[in-house]
Structure formats: structure tokens, C-alpha cells
Image: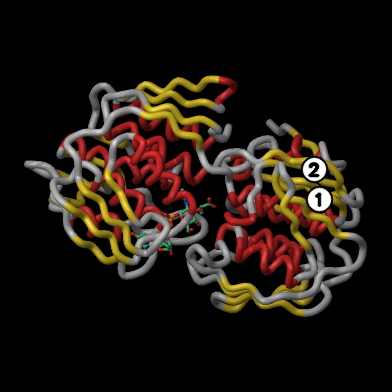
Amino acid sequence: MDSILVKGNGPLNGQIPIAGAKNACLTLMPATLLTDAPLTLTNAPRLSDIKTMNTLLSSLGSEVAMLQDGQVLVLGTKTISNHVADYDIVRKMRASILVLGPMLAREGQAVVSLPGGCAIGARPVDLHLHGLEALGAKLDLRDGYVHATASGGLKGATFEFPFVSVGATENLLMAATLAKGTTVLKNAAREPEIVDLAQCLRAMGAQIEGEGTPTITIQGVDSLHGATHSIVPDRIELGTYMLAPAIAGGDVELLGGRISLLEAFCEKLHEAGIDVTETKNGLRVCRKNGRVNAVNVRTEPYPGFPTDLQAQMMALLCTANGTSVLEETIFENRFMHAPELIRMGADIDVHGGHATVKGVAKLKGAPVMATDLRASVSLILAGLAAEGETIVSRVYHLDRGYERVEEKLSACGAMIERIATV
Ligand code: EPZ
């Protein structure tokens, strides 16, 4: 398992290109199951999760070509030759559940392993299942698998989510495109990745209105055709790298970034004393010396502050001037980066869904362990500003969601390198 060595090396200066969104790509790829025509995705991120989704779709009968060093994906599913999404693949990546809706919509049958929990929480899929039942699916849970059937096809219906779920909205949105009649999804997720999926499905011939609002209306069609779609920039990668000059100081331009993807996050950065300006190529973040202001953060579904940036923001606030309180409202166990930051000298008190962070003047480098994707990158950010060396182990977590992090940061002057360990 590789580790990453980071040495605090002062302010960062330069440019960082932002890749296509992992969480958009992971829902766009299963859309190939909805049609027998080719689906081309450009601006795809080069990540291990994308390779895992490729493996899963290929096991179902899809053909996936990864062109231009993995930045262009051409997916074709002339026939679905296997209707079982196997536990061995699904357990590696929870987004695998997103093959359930499209496969059921096209074939009237699907068998998908329950994904199980992960480090940040139990992460059930009951909303996915209840929503598909509302569309007429018959579901039988046995042996750790969902056995789903929809004889005669899915039927349009109105379904109100009891609380916002990104994945359940995506699964139902895809399923509804081929359901007979009209589907109305209420209290739907509004994330930019949902909007991106809807735009791609529309390009494939789907009839969808209201994406990005709490109510999405879908008129089912008999079939979908192919399309070419450019994946939206990754707002979580964007926010993560905006925090690099915020924590270490300096002046960095994030190529492809847009404030519209991260308004709540940019407001918090402004409150902390970090100004973000739009350039013709993206976003510019610069911070001269001095400590940032402490701010309070509460994670919420989009357009609120993203839970996927909570760990990274905590790293910044560990060195702020004053005390900050972070409230995590989306996942029940998403403060596992706190004990690792404490090893670096941070002053953090976690109680339930709240973490109180008393800023310290300087963190100290230390050996730390990545526990999940976003926790791993928050430790790297902390290492950029710490005195001495930080070694982050178990960086396979990192490779799931950040392409070539050490290249992107060292291009801006960071002292960071990957240490291959047997
Ligand atoms: C997506 O996960 C993202 N993953 C997550 O990003 C992100 O943190 C999350 O949305 C929230 O924005 C992908 O898009 C692949 P949810 P998802 O359904 O769809 C509960 C990252 O770091 N829930 O919106 O699984 C759930 O347990 C990852 O890139 C149910 O109870 O999130 C959670 O507490 C981490 N039943 C809350 O709802 C369900 O059926 C929100 O989950 C579904 C969800």
C-alpha cells in the first residue's frame, strides 16, 4: 500500500487543472445500460473508481473503451448478457447500486448485491428500493442481493423522498426515462451531478424537466439513443485544491473551476478571509500571510455546504485564529480525520455530529493514516502547512477520487511525493 510524504514548504503558486466529476461519471456510466447505442463521455477523470465501474459494466455485457489516456469513455451495451451485479465488485464501490435502476428499466429484471456500509456510515439503500417499488418493481431481498423484476416494464408514478438522497435520485431518474407514463420525483437531490446526468439523458432522447430543483418530472419514452456528453468539472476536487493555497498561503489558479458549482463553500472561504476571484480560465485563490478567521460550518444537501468538503475545511480551520464548530448532518461517522489531525497537533473535540476546532498557530508533521477518500486528502492539505514531514498511509483511498494529486500539488511548489511500499 503506497504512502504519500508531504513536507511543509511555504506558499504555493501556479495552476491546477480540475478534472471531470467522479460523482457525475459514476452515474453517467450506468446510463449505457438504458440503450443499445454508443454513449461517449468526454472529460472523464482517471480514477480507480472509474475502472471499478468499468469492470462492473463489462461483467453485465457492456463494452467500455477508455481512450485518450482514460479521458474519453466510449460505452456500448448492445445486449445485457448478465443481469447479476456481483458482491465482489459491488462491495468495492457503493455507487455500483446505480446499475439497478437502468438495468431494471431496460430488461425488466436485475439482481444487484446490496453494497453494504463503508467507513463513513451504514449507507442503506432503502430509498432506492422504495422508489423503484413505486415505479412498479417487485423486489425480493435474499442472500445479500436485491432481486428486482418489473414484468411489463416500469410504470410512471409520483414519489416523494423522505429526505434528500443523491444516489436514489439518480437511480430513479434513470429508471423513469423508460417507464410507461409520467414520473414526478419530489424532494429530489439538486446537486450539479444530477443536472449533468439529466442533460446527458436528455441528449439520449429522454424527456426530463426540473433537474436542479426539488421536483423533477420525467415522461417515459420507448427507447433512448446514443449521445456524446462532456462531464461537468469536479466541484469537490475544485474545493479541495482551493484549500491548498488557503492553508499554505500563495496564489493558485484552478483551471476549469466555476464559483457557480460551489457558492456556499466560497461564501465560507470569504468569511474565513480567503477571497476567490473568477478568471477567464477558472478560479483564482490567493492568501498572503496571517491566519484565516475561524468560521462555523454545517453540511447540507446542495446548494448547502458539501459534506464531501467537510474534512478538508476542518484541516484549514485547525490553523484558524479562533474556534470553529463543524456540524456534519449527512453521514453519521464522518469525523475520522479528526484523530489523525490531532496527531498533527490540532485541537479538536468531537461530540456526536459536531466537531469543535480551536485553531493553533502551526501543525506539526506526523505519520497519519487515511481512513476514507476525503479524510485522506484533508491530511495532505494539513501536511502542506505543517512544520516537518507528514506521511499519509493507505493512500489507495485517495486514488479513488483524486487523479495524480502529488503531480498537481508539486507543480505549484509543494514538496510531496508518493512512496511505493510493498
Ligand atoms: C453521494 O453518495 C456521493 N457519492 C457521496 O460522495 C456524497 O457524500 C453523497 O452523495 C452526499 O452528497 C457518489 O455520488 C458516488 P446520499 P450517496 O444517498 O448517493 C442516507 C465522495 O466522497 N441514505 O445522498 O450514497 C445516507 O446513508 C462520496 O465522493 C439512506 O438512509 O449519498 C446518508 O446518510 C462519499 N437511504 C444520506 O442519506 C438511502 O436509500 C445521504 O446519502 C440512501 C441514502
**Mark 1 close to ligand 1, CB under 8 Å:** no
User: Image quadrant for the N terminus?
Assistant: top right
Quadrant for residue 295, please give it: bottom right
- Residue 8 is situated, as x and y percent measured from the top left of the image, at 88, 51
Labelled pair 1, 2 in contact (Cβ < 8 Å): yes
Q: Amino acid at mark 1?
A: Thr
In the picture, measured across the screen, residue 121 lies left or right of residue 58, that is right
Q: Nearer the viewer, residue 393 or 320?
A: 320
- Say the numbered circle drawn on residue 59: none
Label 2, residues with CA under 10 Å away: few <14, some 14-19, many ≥20: many
Q: Nearer the viewer, residue 316 or 278?
A: 278
Q: CA distance from mark 1 to mark 2?
A: 6 Å
* Residue with the mark numbered 2: 5
Quadrant of the image where one finds ligand 1: bottom left
- Say the numbered circle drawn on residue 390: 1
Label 1, residues with CA under 10 Å away: few <14, some 14-19, many ≥20: many
- Residue 173 is situated, as x and y percent measured from the top left of the image, at 30, 50
Q: Nearer the viewer, residue 245 or 417?
A: 245
Helix, strand or loop under label 1: strand
Outermost left residue: 152
Outermost front residue: 280
State the residue at coordinates (23%, 48%).
Answer: 176
